[in-house]
Image (spheres, rainbow, N blue to C red):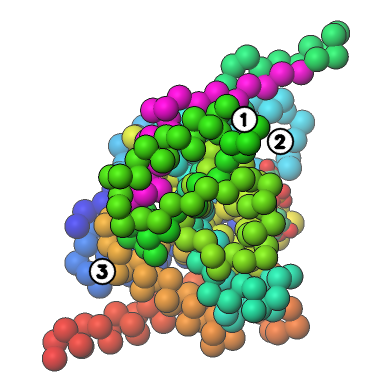
């Protein structure tokens, strides 16, 4: 298969971790005879330095000419004096809007080898594999009116959803649940909010189209508790923008390090893939960054843009294997010795190559 990937590595540790993710995608392409092409473009602080703007037109053109955008991270303290609309992060917000994805996918997976990195007990996290589907373009973050009137001392944000907005993100969640353990948990606050009542009724109205999926509804406050008590009970969790923002961050605790978390934003013109972490200026250029979040993000590119499910699972298994063998970057090392960003990338690459060799020799038999 062919895939045109725009690579926006960004600032800080962005280029370091993105390099390792691209290496993994190249390895998959070579092994399977796929044609992945990579076009690099500037975003964030590096773009301000080179072009005077965090999102140059060339970057927009490169992104729109691609079939998937792989982003590293943006943010550089040296631009903190600029107004928010001129800072590196504004380039990220703009590119997200241009690409138009409305469904943000955030996996929360417990890796047995990292059980001691989570503050939760291992018998709670064991076997946890949740996929959050967060609505990204509606709700409180975007609806009008919104204002802060400093004279009257009044501030307003509005939560508005239409049935169509709920339908399109709910369908994505149902489809993903169908490819996983066939359970969908929809989270709302239907005991108080009309928006949530619309949300719940809309999800229920789609149930007859997906008879194989078990659907349950949870109120967001009790969901926050269940996620920490019985996270194993959840498969796909669908929710609106604000609740999804909070719950998916809360669930980061299950994996144990920000550097391990991937994400994808789908449903728009072009899918956008990015690790959850920022540019980590405190460790940039030191070879200390954990590239596994970016590598697991590459697995999401394979799954959601290339349709290569087996290859995506092979990358995820290679990450598991390397962790199980005891290799750690500094953020997850605890008292163990740490490997560098590049060494971690090479270890995953080697584990993946080994599993590809094994499966190719099995096919040959
Ligand atoms: P951050 O995610 O960059 O870092 C938080 C902490 O986690 C730091 O101690 C950092 O060293 C550590 N960390 C993050 N990723 C890591 C990795 N892969 N491996 C090892 N350790 C890792 O968040 P922050 O410090 O709040 O923000 C730094 C900059 O990044 C700011 O300019 C912020 O605006 C920006 N930011 C960008 C994004 C994005 O690009 N999506 C997201 C969050 C923050």
Q: Dot 2 lies on which element? A: helix
Up the image or down, 272 lies above or below 296; here it is above
Name the residue located 42 percent from the left edge and 34 percent from the top edge: 202
Residue assigned mark 3: 30
Q: Dot 3 lies on which element? A: helix
Q: Dot 1 lies on which element? A: loop
Q: What quarter of the picture does the C terminus occupy?
A: bottom left
Tell me which label, 1 or 2, sits earlier in the chain: 2
Is there any visible trace of residue 69 in the rendered image?
Answer: no
Residue 301: x %, y % from top left? 37, 55
Residue assigned mark 1: 193
Q: CA distance from mark 3 to mark 1?
A: 51 Å
Up the image or down, 94 lies above or below 145; here it is below
Tell me which label, 3 or 1, sits earlier in the chain: 3
Q: Pointers 3 and 1 in contact (CB under 8 A)? A: no
Magenta-highlighted residues: 155-175
Up the image or down, 351 lies above or below 143; here it is below
Residue assigned mark 2: 79
Looking at the rendered image, the disc whose residue lies closer to the viewer, 3 or 1, is 1
């Amino acid at each position: 298969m062919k895939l045109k990937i725009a690579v926006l590595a960004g600032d800080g540790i962005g280029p370091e971790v993105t390099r390792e993710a691209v290496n993994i995608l190249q390895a998959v392409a070579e092994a399977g005879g796929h044609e992945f092409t990579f076009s690099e473009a500037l975003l964030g602080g590096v773009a301000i330095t080179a072009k005077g703007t965090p999102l140059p037109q060339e970057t927009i053109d490169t992104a729109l000419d691609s079939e998937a955008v792989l982003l590293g991270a943006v943010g550089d303290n040296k631009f903190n004096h600029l107004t928010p609309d001129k800072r590196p992060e504004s380039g990220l917000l703009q590119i997200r809007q241009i690409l138009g994805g409305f469904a943000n996918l955030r996996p929360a997976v417990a890796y047995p080898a990292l059980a001691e990195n989570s503050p939760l007990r291992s018998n709670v996290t064991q076997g946890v594999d949740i996929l959050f589907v967060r609505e990204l373009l509606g709700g409180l973050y975007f609806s009008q009116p919104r204002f802060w009137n400093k004279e009257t001392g009044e501030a307003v944000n509005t939560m508005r959803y239409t049935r169509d907005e709920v339908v399109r993100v709910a369908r994505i969640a149902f489809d993903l649940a169908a490819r996983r353990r066939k359970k969908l948990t929809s989270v709302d606050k239907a005991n108080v909010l009309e928006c949530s009542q619309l949300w719940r009724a809309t999800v229920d109205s789609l149930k007859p189209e997906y008879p194989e999926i078990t659907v349950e509804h949870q109120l967001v406050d009790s969901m926050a508790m269940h996620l920490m008590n019985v996270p194993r009970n959840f498969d796909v969790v669908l929710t609106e923008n604000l609740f999804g923002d909070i719950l998916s961050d809360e669930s980061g605790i299950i994996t144990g390090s920000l550097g391990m978390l991937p994400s994808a934003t789908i449903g728009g013109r072009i899918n956008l893939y990015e690790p959850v972490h920022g540019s980590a200026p405190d460790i940039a250029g030191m070879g200390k960054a954990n590239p596994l979040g970016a590598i697991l993000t590459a697995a999401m590119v394979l799954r959601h843009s290339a349709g290569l499910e087996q290859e995506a699972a092979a990358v995820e298994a290679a990450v598991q294997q390397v962790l199980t063998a005891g290799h750690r970057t500094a953020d997850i090392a605890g008292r163990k010795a740490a490997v560098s960003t590049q060494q971690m990338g090479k270890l995953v690459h080697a584990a993946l190559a080994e599993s590809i060799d094994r499966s190719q020799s099995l096919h040959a038999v």
